[in-house]
Image (cartoon, rainbow, N blue to C red):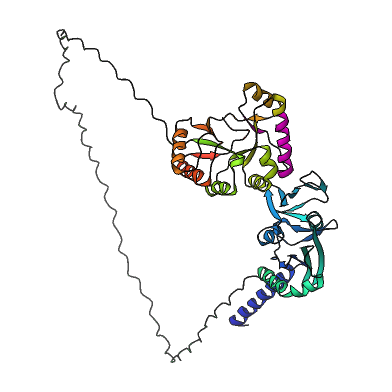
Amino acid sequence: MSRRQRLTAAILCLLCLFRLTYAAALPNELYFVAVENMVLPLTEETMPFWHDGYLYISGDAFTGAVRDTVGISRAKIGDAILLYRGEQSLLFRKDYPYAQDSEQNTYAPGMVWQGDNGYVPASVVARYFNLLYSTTDVEHGKLVWLRSASFNMSESAFARAAAFQLNTVYQEYVRTLEPEPVPDPEPVPVPDPEPEPEKEPSAPPEPVPEPVPEPVPAQEPEPKPESVPAPPVSRAVPRPSAPVSKPVTPSKPAAVTQPEPEPVTPEPPPEPEPSLGNQRIYLCLRGDGVTSSLLDALDRHGIRATVFCDEAFLSGQGDLLRRMAVTGHCIGLYVEAGTTASVLDRLKDCNLLLQRTTMEKTRLALIDGGGEELLRAARNAGFLCLRPTLSRTETPLRTSRQAADLLNLVSQQPETLSLWIGGAVNRSGLNSFLTDALAIGDTFQPWTETASV
């Protein structure tokens, strides 16, 4: 077999091996997912599967365009997934056999966690959010279809109408499984062997006479040299390069009387100027001043804050509360001072409202106008009350000038401080303050139970 034939056979073997690998990568049955009239992309990480008699779909299905189609949004909180629409919310936790709604009602089964993705049971999601759910046979597998009750189309009619989308999604999925084509190696030209020139018959070599060795004359023994005495070694002592003088004892100088210096009054050291920048600031805001645009300004700078919310905010701003909880902001409780019993009752009521919306409670609180006795009672009840280093409640934060004044006040505070912005604040003023503070090296973080102030 020639070299070219061996190379061709090796390439054919590689192609057969790639095709076998590709065929083994295709699962026995594919599951497509459609929400309303939209077929979702098909990937190995998000493909539905059956487990204990329930069909599970990826929680990532409720993002992007799906969120705008059926109004269901997904929030990922660590190892938990929160699905919500308006005031409805369904929380799935890892390793929990059930899900919980905002009223603490449970729905079984719970979430299944695989790799980095959480999969939720399609039947539970459809039942809680009043969706229709079905499974239909299609050309390349099965179609899992979620839609609202008002979507007026039968399963078979939708499968026919979505045939083009299903085929497009299938082709994209197949393309991700195909191995990258291996380019054919360029054939290496093999030069034809050149004909060897004909050799003329040569005459036999003449015999070379062997050399006759010349006679070697006998060598006379060399005479031994007579012993010569070694020259004497010089023992001269080196002379010093300069004469050595004897030490001279210096004479004691006569005492000279000097005038006493006049007393000098030392100048007082200059007062240290406040260090501008490189401060750690625990940023605390009041909930009734927080809007979506204010959260946008914080997200733009990558800053998280602690937002203290009163009862009205907790009962009427569910979307903002869920956004703050999902994006890493801390939520505290805000109440005004009163009798000890009334303050503690309001703190407990606020915590229940927070739990209904975000499935979490908090120990952080701010009692506006509370004295030491009231703070001690709240602390004994399990709450951690904020006592801000710098309180900014009277002056608004709406212009760049007000932001510069606030930054000047912050620079006169300790290196680590808690800043309470409880007055009127808008996106422009907060953005100016954060931009200037970050430019001089200040850092921001939310006030938590482990804060050092």
Is 326 in the magenta? no
At x 54%, y 40%, the residue is: 424
Q: Could you tell me which residue is drawn at 45 percent across and 90 percent down?
A: 197
Q: How many labels, in total?
A: 0
Q: Nearer the viewer, residue 267 or 203?
A: 267
Query: In the visual, does 139 lie left or right of 227?
Result: right
Residue at the extreme right: 53
Magenta span covers which residues?
344-368
The answer to whether residue 208 is left or right of residue 263 is: right
What secondary structure predominates along the stretch shown in magenta? Answer: helix
Asked if 96 appears above or below 392 in the picture, the reply is: below
Q: Quadrant of the N terminus?
A: bottom right
Residue 219 % position (x, y): 30, 58
| Residue 320: % across, % down | 64, 47
Q: Is residue 339 visible?
A: yes
Q: Could you say which is closer to the camera, residue 357 or residue 239?
A: 357
Q: Can residue 116 be seen from the camera position used here?
A: no
Task: Indicate the quadrant where residue 17 lies.
Answer: bottom right
Residue drawn where x is 27% and y is 47% of the image:
224
Question: What is the quadrant of the C terminus in the image?
Answer: top right
**Quarter where residue 142 is shown:** bottom right
Q: Is residue 36 above or below residue 301?
A: below
Q: Closest to the observer: 408 or 191?
A: 408
Q: Residue at x 14, y 8 (%)?
A: 254
Q: Is residue 5 above or below residue 117?
A: below
